[in-house]
Amino acid sequence: MKNTQTVPPTRFPDRLIEKAEARWWIAKTKSRQEKQLAFDFLEKEIEYYLPLYKKTYLLPAKPGCKRKKRFYMLPLFTGYIAFAQDSPHDIYKTGRVVQLIEVKNQQRFIKELSVVYRALDKGHLVLPATHNIEPEMEVEIIKGALKGVRGKVLNIRNSRFLMLSVEGMGKAMVRVGTDSVREI
């Protein structure tokens, strides 16, 4: 049966990252295949996490009409999806995977990925880190759902962002208020 949905669930099954029943792995996908691989995992009931963020595009205005907005859910870590299996099997049979990355430090990976999961789950604005910007200072979040999370603050277009990184997958940013952090 063909899947008619355009966006898979970001997490299957719907539970905390640290509650995974197997080892975490990272699949590096072919271009623009992350969501389709998530559907493949869903169909085979393989536990996975594919963090997505909402991107808004303004379409060109037609004469006499207002500009329309189009929304897309895009992978936060382009080209990567995390999945949990004791020993990956048949991963390349999908035709969507170019490389399998073993997560050697499971505790660190789970901790870092859990921060991204919590931030998105609590409705924080999390965006892919597309700039190669040097960090200004290291901070710790002192209140809210992300209390205790440490990272580097970046100044981007007059907004403060905290850099979150997940080893093996990439980096992302979450918007934080200056009153929510302390320098470490």
Image: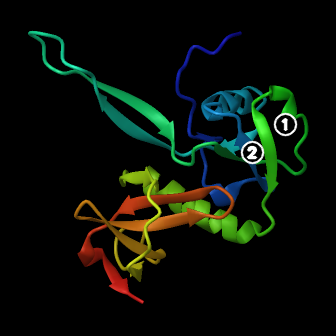
- In this picture, is 67 found above or below 114? above
Label 2's element?
A: strand
Q: Is residue 13 visible?
A: yes
Residue 124: where, in percent of width, then height? 36, 55
Q: Residues within 10 Å of mark 2 (few under 14, many from 20)?
A: many
Identify the mark at residue 32; answer none if there is no mark. none
Q: Is residue 22 visible?
A: no
Considering only vertical position in the picture, is 129 above or below 55? Answer: below
Q: In the picture, which quadrant includes the C terminus?
A: bottom left
Give residue 105's position: percent from left, percent from top: 77, 70
Q: How many marks?
A: 2
The quadrant holding residue 167 is bottom right
Left or right relative to 141: residue 8 = right
Quadrant where the image shows the N terminus: top right
Given contact means CB atoms under 8 Å apart, are the residues at marks 1 and 2 in contact?
Answer: yes
Residue 91's disc is: 1
The residue located at (68%, 71%) in the rendering is: 108
Closest to the observer: 76 or 182?
A: 76
